[in-house]
Image: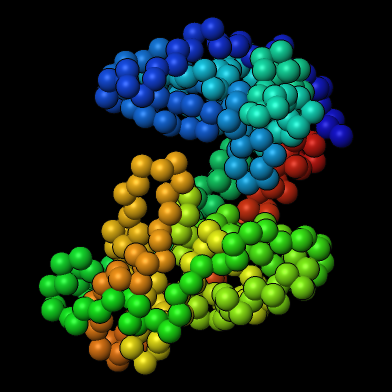
Amino acid sequence: MSKWDLVQLGDVCVILDNMRVPITASERKKGIYPYYGANGIQDYVDDFIFDDELVLLAEDGGNFGSKDRPIAYRVSGKCWVNNHAHVLKPKSMLDVDYLCYSIMFYDVSKLINGTTRAKLNQAAMRKMIIPLPPLPVQQKIADVLDRASVLIEKRKSQIAMLDLLVKSRFVEMFGDPVRNPMGWEVRALGELCNKITDGKHGGCVVEVGSGFFFVGAREISNGEIHYETAPEITPKDFHESYKRCNLEIGDLVIVNTGATIGKNAMAKDLRTNNTLLQKSVALLKANKQLILPIFLQYCYITNPSMYRVESASAQPNLLLSKIRVTEIYVPPLHLQTQFSDFVRAVDKSKAEMQSELERLELLYKSLMQKCFNGEMF
């Protein structure tokens, strides 16, 4: 419980929603001014309707319910805002940065409505309650959280730079994968892999706590398989289909259906042998006498044309037949090994940085809680 007065947003902010103007993509004229929506910059346009220090809060299409992605963000200067974000200008008793931090991760679950698309309407938004410490305290809180945010962003940037380092090393060692300037031998993936298949066609019966996972496109991002969102299924369903797509440590999986087509991951987790793939994911088992899995993965990462799909259908699909005939260059195995060793070394450093990032993010959340509860000032 905060030791400060609690106030409603509608009492401490001027709501400028009536000034918003949506522009369809076809009507936008390219320019230098950011065009904001629910979750940030959508485009750049040639004019502006705001020139102020403001906080934008998602009205619909926001990250409602997320613990990691904010529903509000800060904007400054000339910009355009569409009708998917509320526009808040703090009154004199409220610091703009403090306002942003106080609602970034606000739980609006009891305020939003809408059956197909969650919406935080203006009447509900005005009733959101925040603590209101004295202005100097607000500024101190914002300063503390600013400094913590900078550390987090710096660590994220360092992790991103390691990813770029590996991609650069790949091209340095083997040349551009499309042009093949070093003249390496070229072979089809069907010749280089012992198995290329997709996951189970059809659903499975859910059994929470079974320890058997049904992994689909949603679980594959940032080079990892994210088991926290994977449904657990019955042992019967797992064993009936596992022979078709027997995922093992070292295998490469690629999203072959939907909006995230081409996303890929190397199977590394101890839960791998208890994982059944869904139809939306393709499994590639590299013949390690010819090609190493890490090398194969970076062929996909550095050459998007390997998974580009030209299809008029609403649901793009990278057919297994296309994967099998896709050709890639095949450098000598000893060079692939050198590259794999380099990736493992970088991954070790990346894991250490990721651990530090998670620690910083936990500290940040703790700081936010203490600040807004009045435990620090």
Residue at position x 18%, y 81% in the image: 184
Q: Which quarter of the rendered picture does the N terminus lie within?
A: top right
Residue 156's place in the image compared with 146, above or below, is below
Which quarter of the figure has residue 119?
Answer: top right
In the image, taking residue 233 as reference, residue 358 lies left or right, namely: left
The percent coordinates of residue 298 (x first, y second) are 36, 70
Q: Residue at x 27, y 20 (%)?
A: 29
Position above or below: 332 against 228: below
297 on left or right of 267: left
Outermost residue, right side = 1
Which scheme is used to colour this image of the protein? rainbow
Q: Toward which corner of the image does residue 303 lie, by quadrant?
A: bottom left
Picture residue at 57% right of the left edge, 76% below the top? 244
* Residue 22: percent from left, percent from top: 44, 16
**For residue 59, side relative to residue 317 (left or right):** right
Q: Nearer the viewer, residue 73 or 309?
A: 309
Seen in the picture, residue 20 relative to 180 is either above or below; the reply is above
Between 356 and 25, which is closer to the camera in this rendering? 25
Q: Is residue 128 left or right of residue 323?
A: right
* Quadrant containing the C terminus in the rendered view: top right
Residue 238 lies, in percent from the top left, at 70, 72
Answer whether residue 330 is visible to the viewer in this image. Answer: yes
Residue closer to the observer: 306 or 65 = 306
* Residue 265 shows up from this direction: no
Q: Residue visible at 41% across and 77% down? A: 294
